[in-house]
Amino acid sequence: MNAKIQEIGKNYALFCGDSAELLKDVPENSIDYIIYSVPFLSLFSYSNSDRDLGNCRTDDEFYIQFGFITDELLRVLKPGRLMSIHCMDLPTSKEKDGYIGLKNFRGDLVNHCTRKNPGGWEKNFIFHSEVCIFRDPVQAMQRTKALGLLHKQLKKDSCMSRQGIPDFVITFRKPGDNPDPVTHTNESFPVSKWQRYASPVWTDIDYSDTLNYKAAREGKDERHICPLALPIIERCYELWTSEGDTVLTPFLGIGSEAYMAVKMGRKAVGIELKESYYRQAVANVKSVAEDTQGNLFDMEE
């Protein structure tokens, strides 16, 4: 890949640069699974780069730019294999949006991934599944001071009160037959475990179980880091990948998805635009990677 910085190990290949450009160097039908936490429109500022999706001026601009990435993700994923996106619906503000409410970000992402290409469903991602993940509204209220979660708002006008906002993992499948079926045994995946994972609502995710992110902060432009909880990634890998599979994340961040891939015996390919995030991601992945160095795959092929 033509990345300004890269780190290649036996079980990982990490690149610092723009996913819209670097994904073009990934071979077609070479990736077994894709997982990432998508930038939340312009809700948070991740960096001061013009290439950062979080800095798009409008929602329409975001989906146009995101389309360059999702086109490539569909190309590099193997037929019949899956792509999972971590997301949430987004609160609006009176100052920025003119009203207090929610944007259906989850629904817009589903529409984007399933309808953006002409030519019928064979040339688009198929909406495969989704899981709603419980988030504690008390913690959200303490962190955001959102009007709708304040107890005093009930006494003032409860028509402005609302429930907390959960997380979602929405999963898509590339059309075609899976060349490498992911199989399980009763020992590795007993019925009791499958019943928990098959639930449409996960209420037992420990959101404190994340990678350390403090070293990735930069005072000039950093206002938000929210690493994906490791138990969510672990469940997705257990469900939808096998040992030795190659996992891709186009928004590497501080490396949570790549870290868990290597830890669980998978291979990781990650791309991150922001250099401070990237440096922390490399440190996190190398902490669980084997010492032996070598190419994950020949990118020139």
Image: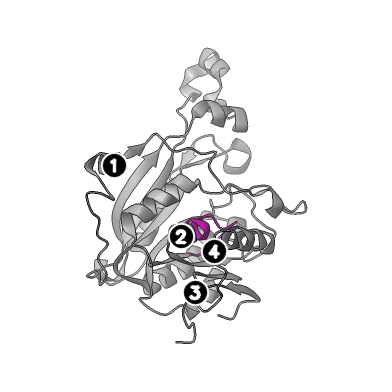
**SS of the residue under disc 2:** helix
What numbered label is drawn on residue 289?
4
Give the residue type at disc 2.
Ala
The quarter of the image holding the C terminus is bottom left
Residue 224 pos. (x, y %): 64, 47
Q: Which residue is mark 3?
A: 23
Disc 3 from disc 1: Cα separation: 35 Å
The quarter of the image holding the N terminus is bottom right
Can you tell which of label 2 and label 3 is closer to the viewer? 2
Question: Is residue 120 in view?
Answer: no
Q: How is the image coloured?
A: one colour
- Label 4 environment density (alpha carbons within 10 Å; few <14, some 14–19, many ≥20): many
Q: Earlier in the sequence, mark 4 or mark 3?
A: 3
Camera-side residue: 120 or 269?
269
Q: Mark 4 near mark 3, Cβ–Cβ under 8 Å?
A: no
Disc 4 from disc 3: Cα separation: 23 Å
Q: Which residue is mark 1?
A: 193
Q: Earlier in the sequence, mark 2 or mark 4?
A: 2
Camera-side residue: 221 or 117?
221
